[in-house]
Amino acid sequence: MDVMVERCAGLDVGKDEVVACIRTPKTSGHGRHSELRVFATFTSALETLADWLTENGVSEVVMEATGPYWKPIWYVLEDREFDLKLVNAKHVKMVPGRKTDMADAAWLAELLEHGLLRSSFVPPPAIRELRDLTRYRKRLIQTHTAEQQRVQKILEDAGVKLDSVASDIFGVSGRAMLAALIAGERDPDTLAALAKGTLRQKLPELREALRGRFRDHHAIILKITMDHVAHLEDAIAALDAEIERVMVPFSKARDHLDTIPGVAKRSAECIIAEIGIDMTRFPTAAHLASWAGMCPGNNITGGKRGSGKTTKGNRWLGEILNQCASAASHTRDTYLAAQYWRLVRRIAKRKAAVAVGHSILVICWHLLTNDCDYADLGGDWFTRRTDLDKRRDHLVRQLQDLGYGVSLTKAAA
């Protein structure tokens, strides 16, 4: 095979060591020369690795995406003049029974020199920092929700039916009652008197709901849980402030995405954190949808089509797009809502949400590429399109009756 890269290197990454293989031309001018070395994953050793690659004139370096272990190596080599490639381990799998670290590094280098590897998307440092913040915030929000549900379980175990009367037990009134329970107050009348606003209209129901078997055992667990809830709320607020600071260079792009129905400010931040704002990495919107795993896969063998389920892509992005699709389905007189309810009639709601999420991602690509806001087609788009199709077909048939050779397919194109 033709050699596409004269001087390259393949790295087999592990937790404690990295095996490097460089491929260079032989001094005689015929054939290829390989050299293997093993380096520790400490920063000083990785800098030695970078120096060794530079001394040998290596221009391109490839490594597998092995958990989080590739990141320190990538960050050290990123500061040097290397063309780095991160590849999916599934795409470069060795023959079973012949797998060693040395063989893996040599195999990666050989594939790279022949131009047979396709690099994965690795965002720039600013987007990586934003991604770390948004992903951690999402995990804290999920933990916060779980702790709130734990509070409800504690009250249910104690026979206190506060959530059956109050719509939000973590509002001002609910938190006051919970604090009183932790402090040792057990009298239903006294607890109900802590209600504020419209909740005071339900005082008789509150007295009944607060009459239970709340013990000191429940108070201890409830106090620890409420302290954890307060800590999580402070942490989420701190992350919000930091994300707002990091988002300053990308605020214009966030405002563009915020114009899409179903995409709010926080959702736009998460989308930008996952795909960045430079869409030149994805030649078309279809490439972006394929990378994200938001489009059907191909599975055709022997002329028979198998399951076309979506591929495994960026699950963080997929989750936020599905949430945006669900929110868009509840908007009024919008194209995305019309698309969702049009699809729900013949496929499941989950599949319809994936289809709308795909549309949102395609819209994001166009907005970021063209640096513009979203212009909605309207909730009646599909009706208007059907009417246009009918008028077009009627015109084609009239032309055919007059002897003109016009086909429906060409007219549609």
Image (cartoon, helix red, strand yellow):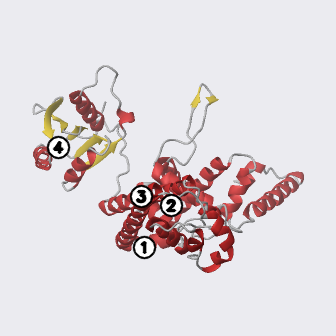
Q: Residues within 10 Å of mark 1 (few under 14, many from 20)?
A: some
In this rendering, which labeled residue sits more in front, label 2 or label 4?
Answer: 4
User: What residue lies at 34% left-to-right and 21% top-to-bottom?
Assistant: 96
Question: Which residue is labeled 3 in the image?
Answer: 220
User: What residue lies at 39% left-to-right and 61% top-to-bottom?
Assistant: 228
Of mark 1 and mark 4, the one earlier in the sequence is 4
**In the shown orientation, is residue 243 left or right of residue 322?**
left
Q: Residues within 10 Å of mark 4 (few under 14, many from 20)?
A: many
Residues at marks 1 and 2, CA–CA distance in whole angstroms: 16 Å
In this rendering, which labeled residue sits more in front, label 1 or label 2?
Answer: 1
Residues at marks 2 and 3, CA–CA distance in whole angstroms: 51 Å
Residues at marks 1 and 3, CA–CA distance in whole angstroms: 44 Å
Residue 207's place in the image compared with 290, above or below, is below
Which labelled disc corresponds to residue 41? 4
Residue 284 seen: no
Disc 3, SS: helix
> Residue flagged by tag 3: what amino acid is it?
Ile
> Residue flagged by tag 2: what amino acid is it?
Trp
Which labelled disc corresponds to residue 136? none
In this rendering, which labeled residue sits more in front, label 1 or label 3?
Answer: 3
Residues at marks 4 and 3, CA–CA distance in whole angstroms: 46 Å
In this rendering, which labeled residue sits more in front, label 4 or label 3?
Answer: 3
Q: Position of residue 281 (x, y in %)?
A: 40, 55
**In the shown orientation, is residue 64 left or right of residue 200?**
left
> Residue flagged by tag 1: what amino acid is it?
Ser
In this view of the protein, which residue sits in the foreground, 235 or 149? 149
Question: Which residue is labeled 2 in the image?
Answer: 365
Residues at marks 2 and 4, CA–CA distance in whole angstroms: 37 Å
In this rendering, which labeled residue sits more in front, label 1 or label 4?
Answer: 4
Residues at marks 1 and 4, CA–CA distance in whole angstroms: 37 Å
